[in-house]
Image (tube, grey):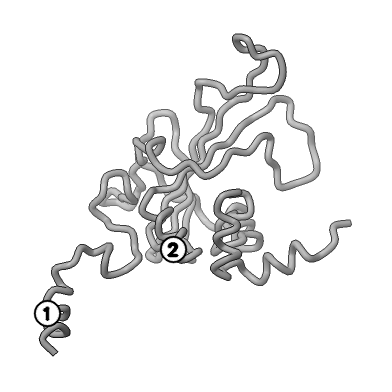
Amino acid sequence: MIRLLAILLLAPLLPLGAQNKDVPRNQPDNLSYTADGLMRFPERYREWIYITSGLDMSYTATGTPDHHMFDNVFVNPASYRSFLETGTWPDRTVFVLEVRGAESGVSINQRGHTQSAEVMGLEVHVKDRTLPGGFGFFEFDERHAPAKMVARPASCYSCHEAHGAVDTTFVQFYPTLIGVAKQKGTIRPEYLKEIATPKN
């Protein structure tokens, strides 16, 4: 009885992260908005967890790119740790998609491509229960000025809702995390049906 009472008394003193799985609001570079609802850019995102890179990815079979592009995806560390435990992303998860050009013939490289030093684009995908539909997309310019959420009904929303393996996220492209989702049983039934359907 005394032990139970001590636990109950100490519970309010535990850090917020120990009481629930939501991402703490007071850690550097976590999700933050201005007073008028613009998202502040997480300047130190490259210190976050790197989860994947893609080369010349496209969600349509038409058209041929006239140049090659890499995209790199980073997620805030607290959300990454939560995903490893649960197989789902907690509220206030932030993904940064960094786009760089693909270069060939750099230094001693004779084949294949390396990534350009210049960042060609920056997009952010946020899971936030306060947003319409519970998530949103933001596009940032090279100045990293606070950005307005991409308005619905942009195609990025319907695409992620229809094809995301976990929640509205493309975990199917995250090679170190798709196995976690399978193990935890958090892959969406709609996605499992989609990959089971033969492609024409």
What is the distance, in whole Å, between disc 2 and disc 1 at their CAs? Answer: 27 Å
In this rendering, is residue 181 above or below 78?
below
Density class for disc 1 (Cα within 10 Å; few <14, some 14-19, many ≥20) is: few
Q: Residue at x 14, y 90 (%)?
A: 1
Residue 18 relative to residue 75: left or right? left
Task: Kindly indicate the quadrant of the structure image that contains residue 142.
Answer: top left
Residue type beneath disc 2: Glu
- The answer to whether residue 121 is above or below residue 176 is above
Please indicate whether residue 88 sits to the left or right of residue 147 in the image: right
Q: Residue at x 54, y 64 (%)?
A: 167
- The quarter holding residue 169 reads bottom right
The residue tagged 1 is: 6
Depth check, front residue: 109 or 90: 109
Residue tagged 2: 85
User: As shown in the figure, which amino acid type bears the numbered disc 1?
Assistant: Ala
Residue 11, compared with residue 54, is above or below; it is below
Where is residue 164 shown, x and y percent of the image? 61, 59
Image quadrant containing the C terminus: bottom right
